[in-house]
Amino acid sequence: MLNVLGLPSGEEGAELTEKEISWAHKVKALELYPDKRLHDPNAHSNFQMLKSSYDTLMDEKARKLFDHLLKVKQEQLRRQSERDAKRRKMVSDLERVRAAFATNLAAKAREKKSRELQGILKRMQEQGQYKQAKWKLICLIRRPI
């Protein structure tokens, strides 16, 4: 409703005086008056919205209800942003754990392959097949994990 009158919303809007609201209504009414906007098919509905917003803001009970509604919406937005911040933190923590786990798995796979290669080399050396062991190791090293 405050936006229709061209007034600030939120806490600033809750502190507006009747004089400020009346002045904003007069200025906006001159701008949106249907007789001045013959080319605009929405002129009448825009002017009616302006009038109903003004009437609501000038009525004391309706204004209190409107201010209460604004406070409730602001509180909901604040809570939602807190939940979103918590959710983003949880997602980033989960991604960090997954990344650490993935690198840990890759390191374990490299370690396992290294132990296997050392075992093969040791067996072949014991059997006196050093040159064959060397070439076999080279082939195994080049093979992906």
Image (cartoon, helix red, strand yellow):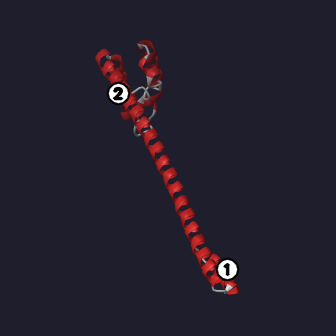
| Image position, residue 143 (x, y; %) | 61, 78
| Image position, residue 20 (x, y; %) | 46, 15
Q: Between disc 1 and disc 2, whose residue precedes? A: 2
- The amino acid pointed to by label 1 is Ile
- The answer to whether any part of residue 115 appears in the image is yes
| Category of crowding for the residue at label 2, using alpha-carbon neighbours closer than 10 angstroms: few (below 14), some (14–19), many (at least 20) | few
| Image position, residue 35 (x, y; %) | 42, 30
The residue wearing badge 1 is 138
Please name whichever residue, 79 or 54, is drawn nearer the observer in this view of the structure: 79
User: As drawn, is 101 to the left or to the right of 119?
Assistant: left
Pointers 1 and 2 in contact (CB under 8 A)? no
Vertical order, 84 against 35 (above or below): below
- The amino acid pointed to by label 2 is Val
- The answer to whether any part of residue 145 appears in the image is no
| Image position, residue 1 (x, y; %) | 39, 27
- Mark 1, secondary structure of its residue: helix
The residue wearing badge 2 is 72
